[in-house]
Image (cartoon, helix red, strand yellow):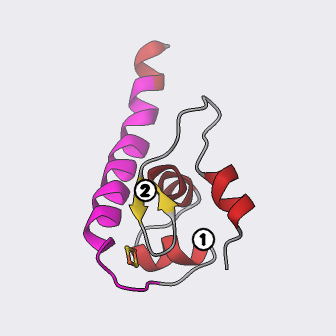
């Protein structure tokens, strides 16, 4: 169960801009999902697990999948970008 404090902390990225709510049932933002993806989450269920919650209505699943796909593309491109800068 997420506390109000953890929701506030997790929705304010270091640059101060608030995250975009993706899962309203669990108050998960795009930042939460990106962090879960960086920790290895590949499926919505793994995102919920990483965030300490479970699917409720499931209406966010497609958006979570899209963000996970974006994260995978960025993770795959990162080594190529670093190599190009060397
Ligand atoms: S919006 Fe994510 S489970 Fe309902």
Q: Secondary structure at mark 2?
A: strand
Examine the structure image and report whether residue 9 is included in the region drawn in magenta.
Answer: no
In the rendered image, residue 16, in percent from the top left (x then y), is placed at 61, 31
Residue 36 lies in what quarter of the image?
Answer: bottom right
Q: In the rendered image of this protein, does residue 83 appear above or below residue 56?
A: above
Q: Are marks 1 and 2 in contact (CB under 8 Å)?
A: no
**Vertical order, 64 against 26 (above or below):** above
Question: In percent of the image, x 37 and y 52: which residue is there?
Answer: 72
Write down the residue under mark 2. 21
- Residue 67, percent from left and from top: 34, 55
- Quarter-wise, where is residue 13 in the image? top right
Residues 58 and 66: in front is: 58
| Mark nearer the viewer, 1 or 2 | 2
Kindly identify which numbered label has been placed on residue 22. none
Q: Where in the figure is residue 51, as x and y percent of width and height?
A: 60, 70
Q: Quadrant of the N terminus?
A: bottom right
Query: Which residue does the image show at 50% across and 13% down from the upper left?
Result: 86
Instruction: Tell whether circle 2 marks a residue whose Cβ is less than 8 angstroms from ligand 1.
Output: no
Disc 2: CA contacts within 10 A as few (<14), some (14-19) or many (>=20): some
Question: How far across and how far down the image is residue 26, in percent?
Answer: 51, 73
CA separation in Å, label 1 and label 2: 16 Å
Q: Which segment did they paint magenta?
A: 55-81
> Residue 14 falls in which quadrant of the image?
top right
Count of numbered circles on the image: 2
**Relative to the observer, which residue lies in front, 83 or 13?**
13
Q: Residue at x 29, y 76 (%)?
A: 59
- Give the numbered dot on residue 50: 1
- Answer yes or no: disc 1 within 8 Å of ligand 1: no
Quadrant of ligand 1: it is bottom left
């Amino acid at each position: 169960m997420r506390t109000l404090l953890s929701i506030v902390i997790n929705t304010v990225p270091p640059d101060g801009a608030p995250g975009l709510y993706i899962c309203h049932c669990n108050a998960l933002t795009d930042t939460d999902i990106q962090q879960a993806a960086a920790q290895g989450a590949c499926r919505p269920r793994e995102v919920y697990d990483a965030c300490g919650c479970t699917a409720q209505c499931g209406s966010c699943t497609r958006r979570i999948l899209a963000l996970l796909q974006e994260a995978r593309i960025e993770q795959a491109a990162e080594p190529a970008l670093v190599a190009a800068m060397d």
